[in-house]
Image: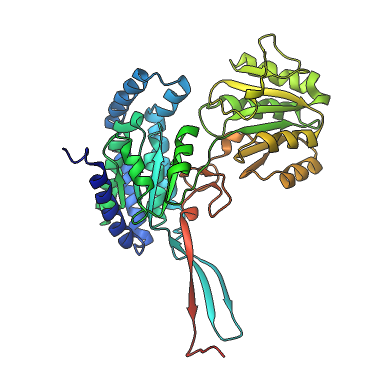
């Protein structure tokens, strides 16, 4: 039996090494972490031809598995996307070091000085599908936040992830930090995922990044705490006071820029007063852009629209498909979103500030937007450099999970011979 076939032994070894590396990384200086990330960025760019060659193998594998065009787009790397990986690594490097940041400080009448400061979580397990850039994003964010990480990439991105990971290791070596701070599971065997989910002695939190099947599996079977979002069921509501040009620009970008990402719009709600005007123009433009529209009764648009079915509401298409329906007013839109959303991202397009206030107050999605494309639901676009995922739960991390969200905190209490009465 080879090492990679003995999955429990393999994963335990990764866990032991990660925990040991985490102890070193927790006290590493910001300068060394910066150097590691810049070194990794330089390595990725220098080895871009090698990464593209490895990615070609992954694309062949994805084709053989019958991946959809949207999934193949997620998997594909070219020079411009590699430049984005490099830019992401550099952006994370330039972020302030969150470790040791004083979140609050106060004095007690007893004479105690109390500080709440950021501290690393420890060891993070990241399980992801298809997108090889997650190898760089997750590795960088965990490193920046002083955490060791065990990366388990999707079988589709196996070769690309290996080369990107080796670039991260190159950066760590150059900064005199332990290479075990960022480890990649060296097997496609799914048993490795099952092991990772139950490694409570070594792993402090699991972050799944992928489709409903993967995230559901992790949430059902993990014994380690999980930061997760199940689906990106993203709604856009066109209010009666929407600006026609903003509506057209935002909806088209939100749906068509990249259809396979979790911030892509999946449902369009149109106020009944603008069905014949702005609504029709937006639906016509979507159809012209090749989007398949599943429309409820009362909408006016291109003949190519198909009748919507109940299953279309609350569905993450991840493709050039959108569900659309008329709503009576903002209350009707909010009621629909509350029923079908996944608390990921929802957007209102309007020039009415009262409507914005109501939309923001009455919905509890991790991200709420006004007159902006939902494709901005991304840690990089939020100024975090990158993200490890979008968390839709309400415990600890929520929304884009950047370096700061990968920390916990501890209290530092100082006295001067102080005793309690």
Above or below, comparing residue 74 to residue 32 in the picture: above
User: Residue at image x 80%, y 24%?
Assistant: 274
- Nearest the eye: 23 or 258: 23
Above or below, comparing residue 175 to residue 278 in the picture: below
Q: Position of residue 316 (x, y in %)?
A: 57, 29
**Is residue 371 among what the camera can see?**
no
Q: Is residue 190 left or right of residue 267?
A: left
Q: Quadrant location of the N terminus? A: top left
In the picture as drawn, the residue positioned furthest to the top comes out as 303
Q: Is residue 214 left or right of residue 152?
A: right
User: Residue at image x 74%, y 47%?
Assistant: 361
Above or below, comparing residue 276 to residue 360 in the picture: above
- Nearest the eye: 282 or 233: 233
- Say which quarter of the image contains residue 154: top left
User: Residue at image x 49%, y 55%?
Assistant: 404
Q: How many marks?
A: 0
Q: Position of residue 63 (x, y in %)?
A: 36, 18
In the picture as drawn, the residue positioned furthest to the left comes out as 1
In the picture as drawn, the residue positioned furthest to the right comes out as 273
User: Residue at image x 45%, y 66%?
Assistant: 100
Q: Quadrant location of the C terminus? A: bottom right
């Amino acid at each position: 039996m080879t090492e990679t076939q003995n999955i429990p032994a393999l994963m335990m070894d990764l866990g032991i090494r990660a925990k040991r590396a985490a102890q070193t990384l927790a006290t590493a200086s910001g300068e060394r972490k910066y150097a590691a990330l810049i070194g990794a960025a330089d390595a990725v760019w220098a080895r871009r031809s090698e990464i593209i060659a490895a990615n070609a193998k992954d694309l062949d594998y994805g084709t053989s598995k019958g991946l959809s065009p949207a999934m193949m787009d997620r998997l594909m790397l070219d020079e411009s996307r590699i430049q984005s990986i490099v830019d992401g690594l550099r952006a994370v490097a330039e972020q302030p070091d969150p470790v040791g940041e004083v979140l609050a400080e106060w004095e007690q009448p007893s004479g105690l000085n109390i500080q709440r400061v950021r501290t690393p979580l420890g060891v993070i397990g990241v399980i992801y599908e298809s997108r090889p850039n997650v190898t760089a994003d997750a590795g960088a964010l965990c490193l920046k936040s002083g955490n060791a990480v065990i990366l388990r990439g999707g079988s589709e991105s196996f070769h690309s992830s290996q080369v990107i990971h080796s670039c991260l290791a190159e950066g760590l070596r150059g900064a005199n930090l332990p290479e075990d701070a960022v480890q990649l599971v060296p097997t496609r065997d799914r048993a490795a995922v099952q092991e990772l989910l139950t490694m409570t002695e070594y792993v402090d939190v699991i972050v799944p990044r992928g489709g409903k099947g993967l995230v559901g599996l992790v949430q059902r079977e993990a014994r380690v705490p999980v930061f997760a979002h199940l689906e990106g069921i993203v709604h856009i509501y066109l209010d009666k006071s929407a600006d026609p040009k903003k509506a057209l620009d935002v909806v088209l970008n939100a749906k068509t820029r990249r259809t396979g990402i979790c911030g892509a719009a999946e449902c369009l709600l149109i106020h009944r007063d603008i069905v014949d005007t702005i609504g029709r123009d937006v639906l016509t433009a979507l159809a012209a852009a090749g989007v398949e529209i599943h429309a409820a009764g009362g909408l006016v648009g291109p003949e190519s629209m198909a009748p919507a079915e109940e299953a279309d509401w609350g569905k993450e298409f991840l493709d050039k498909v959108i569900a659309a329906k008329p709503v009576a007013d903002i209350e009707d839109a909010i009621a629909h979103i509350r029923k079908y959303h996944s608390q990921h991202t929802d957007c209102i397009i309007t020039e009415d500030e009262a409507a914005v206030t109501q939309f923001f107050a009455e919905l509890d999605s991790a991200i709420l937007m006004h007159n902006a494309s939902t494709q901005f639901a991304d840690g990089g676009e939020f100024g975090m450099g990158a993200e490890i995922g979008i968390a839709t739960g309400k415990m600890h991390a929520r929304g884009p999970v950047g370096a700061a969200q990968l920390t916990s905190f501890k209290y530092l209490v100082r006295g001067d011979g102080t005793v309690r009465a």
